[in-house]
Image: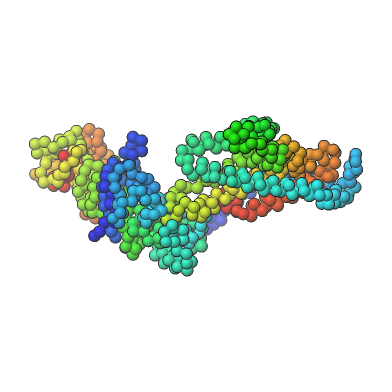
Amino acid sequence: MSTVLSLAGVRKTYGDLNALDGIDLSLPDDSYVSLLGPSGSGKTTLLRVIAGFETPEAGAVSFKGERIETVPPHQRDIGFVFQNFALFPHLSVEKNIAFGLENRVENPITDASVVKSKVRDIIGLVGLAGLEDRAVTQISGGQKQRVALARTLVTEPALVLLDEPLGALDANLRTRMLTELRRIRERCGVTFLHVTGSETEALAMGDTVLVLDQGRIAQAADAETIYNEPKSVAVARFLNCYNLFSGAPSEGRFAGPDGTFPLGGEKSFASSVPGYAVRYDRVDIRPLDAPVAADEVSLPATFVADEYSGPAVNSFFQLDNGRVVEVETHLSVAPAPECRPHARYALVWKQNDALVYA
Amino acid sequence: MSVSATTSETETMTEPVRKSSSKSVWLITPGVIWMLLFLVAPMLMMVYVSFWTQTTFAITPDLTTKSWVTFFTSETYLNSLWTTIRIWLIVLAATLVVGYPAALFVGLFVKNRTIQTALLVLCVIPFWTSFLIRVLAWRPMLGKEGAINLILMKLHIIQQPIEVLLFSELSVIIGMTQIYCVFMVGPIAFMMGRVDQSIIEAAQDLGAGFWRIFRTIILPLTMPGVVVGAIFVSVMVLGEFATAAALSGRKVNLLGNIIVTQVGSLKWAFAAVVGVVLTIVMGVVVAGLLRVVDLKKEL
């Protein structure tokens, strides 16, 4: 697969803040890439640099094999779907979508019938038929999202940047738009770079998932690898499904303020920040006096509360030093744990389910 | 059962609505009374008085169209009507030419909110001095031996002082543009401030250059500001008399100046005629400007 966009050592600072601190990435042609990062990780800055609204202080941005750092945004052929949609409030749905075709500097379409047919096609693709003459102030959030997408797609950019495209939609609509976005992208055959702060969205959408941490790409891999084998403590933390313990490995055990865990069979990663991670759903809740196998790790804790979410129950336990540990029990594979408040239990996991960073 | 519960609920709902609407009448009452007493009544009175009979020293309520005929047959008065309209159009255009780019600059290119506010306050500073001082201050600027002529002569750009700068139509236009420009800048900058930066970026991203974006996005979105600004400027310029009196050396007679003169010589009926004409002109201008943009929709 060829590369449509690549960044090498891109830096951008705002005062003392390194918004982008040496970004290296490359996006393959015709694929869905999601970029996961917490707020303040430089997601939006990265998109704005790619789109051309910001100029990087150092590094190279290459698009379709050409350096574009100094090319103004309107000559880049990169589509940007704004978080707040940024529709033109004085134009109808149809006019919004036709804007790029009619007004672009390079190769504008002057034949009204060509514009009309292109707009009609894209309206069909995103599912807005019947709303052509509506004012964009009179349509729902999901419809606005579609207009914003159609407006960008109709100009046939080689790369579409989506800045938290589902952030302004309610949860129900969000799930529907996820499948829609994938379908639309496959039909258009362009690369989507979907930026989000939601780990579930990033994992669900991306053929490739990029994780951004403090202005750097912390990991770039497919969703399954990211989920099962986060490369660093920071990535594991963003995924929001790992219990993380600080400390350091020494002499066959990982020792830290929360406890000492015997090592053996775990996956280890080289990392500047040491840590020990075990996924919420890999932890088993047992009575304190239940037997523990040789390849298992056991940690005593006090039950605090649980949360029922339908397919799973999340239980919260407190360690002796006050630290909270979360356990997720999938109801399809195990009955709901019935823990009594303030009672003590043993939290048990297999050594080879643990991830160790050192 | 649930249906009956709903109906009884709607019945109880209508009661408080009626009460609050009778309360809301009280909110508007002072305003309505004020407007009736001090706007509608005087206007009707003005129209009525314009048909009264005017003799040299007295005015009697015997209805006649004599004052109206005088106005529309006298070249002086028709000229003054034309001068008023001409000066209004020129000042309107001048405030737009000076004000729109300024407002655009403040709203579009000054990103810092504090600096934006500071720049808009700068526009208002001339209003901290009295109207009369502002007008009269132009005299030492524009006069034959005024600052502008002196500087131009010192720089050897001109040999003779430019006399047309003061006591001419030009000086009236310069003075009025300076005074009323801020009324144009304010509303446009306000509308500009409401234009989301990302809309302009979206247009850029779709491939449009600056002038295209200006014509297709910025101009239509700031049009309500232009219309509101134009209404402010128009109403004030059409009713102007002081700037013309102070800066034209009596060469420029606007309808406002005629009203002042006529009232000064106690020609109430005739002043009323000019007043009615002026009010009609303003009404037409405002109605015409409101046609340009549907303010109801925009604001």
Left or right of A219? Residue B102 is right
Rendered position, B172 above or below A102: above
Camera-nearest residue between B127 and A94 = B127
Q: Nearer the viewer, residue B256 or A288?
A: B256
> With B200 as the anchor, is B7 left or right in this view?
right
Rendering coords of residue B258 (x, y %): 79, 42
Q: Position of residue B161 (x, y in %)?
A: 66, 36
**Residue B27 percent coordinates (x, y):** 66, 42
Residue, x 74% and y 37% (percent of image)? Answer: B249
Q: Is residue B208 left or right of residue A220?
A: right
Quadrant position of the N terminus of chain A in the picture = bottom left
Residue at left offset 72%, top offset 35%: B246
Instruction: Please state the horizontal and vertical placement of residue A334, each as a whole percent of the image.
Output: 21, 52
Q: Is residue B176 visible?
A: no
Residue in the image at 68% along x and 34% along y: B144
Task: Please identify the quarter of the rendering in which residue A300 is found.
Answer: top left
Residue in front for this viewpoint, A310 or B8: A310
**In the rendered image, which quarter contains the C terminus of chain A?**
top left
Q: Nearer the viewer, residue B163 or B21?
A: B163
Examine the rendering and report whether any part of residue A29 can be seen: yes
* Residue B15 as seen in the image, left or right of residue B169: left
Q: How many marks?
A: 0
Looking at the image, residue A159 lies above or below residue A339: below
Residue at (54, 42) in percent of width and height: B102
Residue A356: quarter of image: top left
Q: How is the image coloured?
A: rainbow
